Image: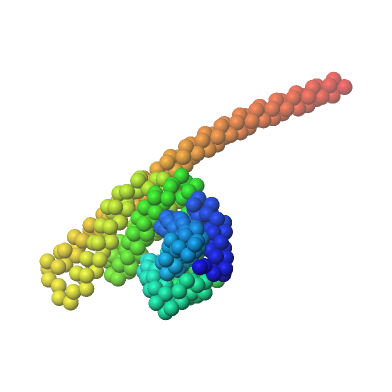
Amino acid sequence: MLSFGYAFFCILVLIISGIYAHRLISGKNLTPKYKKKIQLSLGVLIFIAVALLIFGIDFLHITFLPTYVISIVLSIILNSFLLTLIFNKLQESFHYPLLKIIYYIGITFIFLTSFTIYQGGYGLSFEPTIVTAILVIASSIAVGVMMLFFKVYKNLRSGNVTFNNFPQAFTNKDKIQHYYDQGLNDSEIEYFRSQMAVARDQIKSIETGVNQTAKLRAIEVRYNTIEVLQNFFKDIVEEPTRFTQASQFLYKFLPSLEDLIQKYNEINGHVAKNKQTYLILERSAQTIEQICEQITDEYVLFHEETYKEMQDEIKLANRNLSRKAARQNMNQTQDSDSITDTVSDILKESNDWLDDNNDI
């Protein structure tokens, strides 16, 4: 028969689950990757808690559900739910692939711990589930703190962030909301972010590659390639609905540029080179330069509407300036005529005065 403490624990789980249900199911503040897992964990958690209360109680000494099944399953589901919720928060702050590995290690840890607790003879009790939850949460917090210090140290060394603007580095939640505001759904956001993560890594690889040889640095300086790539990336993130308009950049030029730069540096790093090697390097450099030029053209094309609007504004401004200049010329002409008339009147009055004096 169930203990009072464990029954109370199940009721508490139901209350907490109900509080989080609306927020988690709407899920607009959740990372799409973890949203479905949290919803699934929540649903199963509520189901298991209800089953525990209904079937786990011994009516007329007939147990409909074995107590060890309830103990193990509830422990696994509850801790998986908590772990997923925690790693969703970590994912909002740290966009590292390593988090996925740590997350699944944590899930494995939950399974092993839950079965070990039962095998250790704890049976159906309230304490082991809480102990497991505390272990999982403590491990996740430790991982989060380590990732935080690593991110701060890396950004401070690279000069990308200082203590004054440090909070600006954590804007993933704002970006998720931005994507929702732009009309994207969960699957579109997940796909968009995965593609942009690939593009970001490619840009970093290109930036590293061009700095390895003087020839590639000269090409980069000539076309300002790195800055164009970074701004192009930022503009796509700002306008995710125009993702398809940047398909040439994302799926053709960016991968090709990264691949060519890597191969160029690999060949250039060979100790022995012959005439054929230098010819290949020269042709590769020419192709890289052409791709840089095409990327610049794509960037200009992506902002074509902006340029057209600017041209229209310039034309309107020039038209207004022309009208103003014409109006000023007209006013100057009128003022000149007025001055001429005034001078004529003064001369006439002077002549009349002289004539009058001559008569005297």
> Which residue is most to the top?
359
Tag count in the figure? Answer: 0
The image quarter in which residue 344 lies: top right
Tell me the colour scheme of the image. rainbow
Camera-nearest residue between 294 and 344: 294
Q: Quadrant of the C terminus?
A: top right
For the residue pair 196 and 42, the one nearer the viewer reads as 42
Which residue is farthest front?
Answer: 60
Horizontally, residue 138 falls left or right of residue 357, namely left
In terms of depth relative to the viewer, which is nearer, 169 or 128?
128
Question: In the rendered image, is residue 289 in sight?
Answer: no
Q: Nearer the viewer, residue 12 or 67?
A: 67
Where residue 187 sits in the image (x, y, percent)?
Answer: 39, 50
Residue at 57% x, 59% y is 15
In x, y percent, where is residue 151? Answer: 46, 71
Horizontal and vertical percent for residue 221? 35, 62
Residue found at x 36% / y 57%:
194
Residue 24 visible in the displayed image? yes
- 248 lies above or below 33: above
Q: Residue at x 52, y 71 (%)?
A: 126
Q: Position of residue 195 (x, y in %)?
A: 35, 55
Res 212 → quadrant: bottom left
- The answer to which image quadrant residue 208 occupies is bottom left
Q: What residue appears at the point 40 percent right and 43 percent down from the top-left corner?
A: 304
Q: Residue furthest right?
A: 360
